[in-house]
Amino acid sequence: MSPRYTRLVDSLPATVPFVGPETNERARGAVFDARLGANENGFGPSPRAIAAMSAASADQWMYGDPENFDLKQAIAAKMGVTPAHVIVGEGIDGLLGYLARLLIEQGDPVVTSDGAYPTFNYHIAGFGGVLHKVPYLGDHEDPSALIHRARDVHAKLIYLANPDNPMGSWHSAEVIETMVAQVPDGTLLALDEAYIEFAPAGTAPVIDPDDPRVIRFRTFSKGYGMAGARVAYAIGAPGLIAAFDKVRNHFGMNRAAQIGALAALQDDAYLAETVAKVTRAHARLNTIAAENGLRALPSATNFVTIDCGKDGDFARKVLAGVVKRGVFIRMPFVAPHDRCIRVSAGPDAQLDAFAAALPLALANARG
């Protein structure tokens, strides 16, 4: 006899927002020569973080601190807020899931961009929310359109990533501050700043941490190179932050990950080195694209989105050709952005593998 699922769960399809590279490797019977599609930071974490996590390994018999006290204190000091403004969780994905659980009941309207981060949509659907999508404006999410749609549908929640995934584009702080000022009463803006460490100066907005209209998310997965540790945090008004204690997994944080994130946060020099390496990788990817007659889009993230110049079917052939040659990459899912492929910044050897695979994949795609 089957379990008695809720009506909502029974109505939902089984969904995997992202198929991992390991799944692809098992299917192809070989590991990839280059892993440039999982949206990771291939330059890795600070040596201080590695040392701290190694030293913590013997103590993994203990649960992590359920209050994330030391890490919250350090984040608050770095962000210029109080610990009451900070929630730590299992990656931005985990925190978005908690946020959806806090706010979304069956039928509640939620606004996002068509083609934006799909895991957010997965969480909203899982709690019965109704997604209302607006198109991108060119290669950028459209803050004005998001606000107007939120007003029209009386949205409980708006999602915006700045800088953006999957296009790598970004808006200035002034644009985001204007958007926050226009958030309707009763609506919350979820501002995903996962890539903010790579963004140009003047991208991060100045937001009053007590402002009840916005919660901003940051992560150790991208700039700090700790995607596998699953550590992220959010900054919001204390009342909203306290509400997470009603629904979060209090022992969900890995003890070594907490310790590693604290060490990484204190190593500003290594973060600066990583950002410089990503900038150089951007330049290399731009060159590779140009040498193959393609256009790399400007990026404020740890990846570069490359316009293949035709439609989604052509880009999917290019993608398949690159993957077939041992280089794992991904692409945006929604037209017209599915004309592109997305390639993470990484060490030279991995970019060499991509540079070798791309012209062969393009030749096959062009017939």
Image (tube, grey):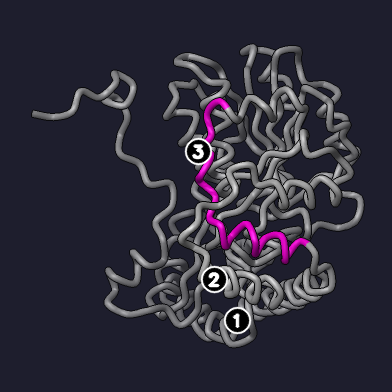
| Residues at circles 1 and 2 in contact by the CB criterion of under 8 Å | yes
Furthest residue in direction left, as rendered: 1
For residue 31, side relative to residue 99 (left or right): left
Which amino acid does the dot numbered 2 rest on? Answer: Leu
| Residues at circles 1 and 3 in contact by the CB criterion of under 8 Å | no
Decide: is 334 above or below 159: below
Disc nearer the start of the sequence (1/2): 2
Instruction: Please identify the quadrant where the N terminus is shown.
Output: top left
Magenta highlight on residue 264: yes
- Horizontal and vertical percent position of residue 255: 56, 57
The residue wearing badge 3 is 249
For residue 41, side relative to residue 212 (left or right): left
At 46% from the left and 68% from the top, the residue drawn is 318
Which amino acid does the dot numbered 3 rest on? Answer: Asn
Numbered range of the magenta stretch: 246-265
Q: Nearer the viewer, mark 2 or mark 3?
A: 3
At 58% from the left and 67% from the top, the residue drawn is 343
Disc nearer the start of the sequence (2/3): 2
* Number of residues whose C-alpha sits closer than 10 Å to that of mark 2, classed few (under 14), some (14–19) or many (20 or more): many
- Horizontal and vertical percent position of residue 190: 68, 33
Which amino acid does the dot numbered 1 rest on? Answer: Leu
Decide: is 188 above or below 233: above
The residue wearing badge 1 is 351
User: What is the distance, in whole Å, between disc 1 and disc 3 at their CAs?
Assistant: 39 Å
Magenta highlight on residue 198: no
* Number of residues whose C-alpha sits closer than 10 Å to that of mark 3, classed few (under 14), some (14–19) or many (20 or more): some
Name the chief secondary structure element in magenta: helix
Decide: is 278 above or below 108: below
Residue 301's disc is none
Front-lying residue, 168 or 224: 224
The residue wearing badge 2 is 36
- Horizontal and vertical percent position of residue 33: 45, 82
